Image: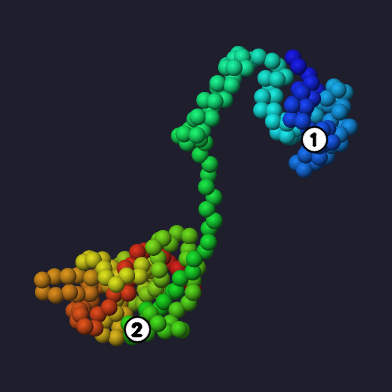
Amino acid sequence: MNSIGDILAKARKSKHLSQPKVAEELNKMGIDKTNKTISAWEKGLAEPNASALMAISKILGITDIYDRYYGDTPEHPITLLNDEGKAKVDEYIELLLASGKYNKKTAEIIEFIPREVKLFYLPASAGPGEFMDASDGFDMITLPDNAPDDTDFMIKIQGDSMEPQFMDGETVYVRQQESVENGEIGIFGLEGKSYIKKLRSTPDGNYLISLNPKYDPIPINAEEFKVFGKVVGQTQFTM
């Protein structure tokens, strides 16, 4: 068994550090010690506590304090190797690290930046141009955490034409795009009004369909028709 003092003294001298310098580095790590304390440790007059021992080991580059203190330990096979064998282990470790295949995975911290989008109201009389451009037709809203990633704006709907899936007063998330596929639900402008409807394309023509069966399909006049976006989710969001 080797003494802590001898281990520290040999490691300090191999690093060409003075006792005052080691004390200075300890102080930077929040371990308030003087060079006299370092001298006392090395002479065996005192021993560092656990925190100080870990800190000074880091400063002196001691990564195997257990082995240095107890000598060869069969619990770790590398301690049974001579210096040449240990050097080959170190070389192999460097090769493994350089390959990138065996490196420890570290968690990536992604900064969350709240995103604001427009929350529009959808009155039955809103015109298509006015709906998207009116300065007083929306509020800026911070997207909820569970909002779809592709949300570009939100709309608070009115009426029961899309029940039971969409209730009066609910808010929907919308991805802004100029077209939707047959059977998809979107936000549309037609003949001076704005709608949340399902698009249906048939050989007889195109229609806006309500989910509530008491409402008839609305024929689409292509010249007065506009797609504002596709509905990608819904929420009970309230003001």
Q: Secondary structure at mark 1?
A: helix
Label annotation for residue 4:
none
Secondary element under disc 2, as helix, strand or loop, is helix
Q: Quadrant of residue 55?
A: top right
Question: In the rendered image, which residue does mark 2 sit on?
Answer: 129
Distance from disc 2 to disc 1, alpha carbons, whole Å, reads: 73 Å
Looking at the image, which residue is at 37% across and 84% down? 130
Q: Which residue is mark 1?
A: 22
Q: Are marks 2 and 1 in contact (CB under 8 Å)?
A: no
Q: Name which quarter of the figure residue 7 lies in.
A: top right
**Along the viewing direction, whichever of 4 and 152 lies nearer the viewer:** 4
The spot of residue 122 in percent (x, y) is 37, 79
Q: In the picture, which quadrant includes the N terminus?
A: top right
**Residue at 49% of width from left, 69% of height from top?**
116
Which is in the foreground here, disc 2 or disc 1?
1
Q: Position of residue 181 (x, y in %)?
A: 23, 66
Query: Residue 45 or 95: which is nearer the viewer?
Result: 95
At label 1, counting other C-alpha atoms closer than 10 Å, the crowd grade (few under 14, some 14-19, many 20 or more) is some
Query: Is 22 left or right of 159, judged from the image as shown?
Result: right
Could you tell whether 127 is left or right of 68 in the image?
Answer: left
Q: Earlier in the sequence, mark 2 or mark 1?
A: 1
Q: Is residue 34 above or below residue 124?
A: above
Res 121 seen here:
yes
**Residue 187 seen in this snapshot:** no
- Residue in the image at 27% along x and 78% along y: 226
The image position of residue 136, as x and y in percent, is 46, 84
What amino acid type should be assigned to the residue bearing mark 2? Gly
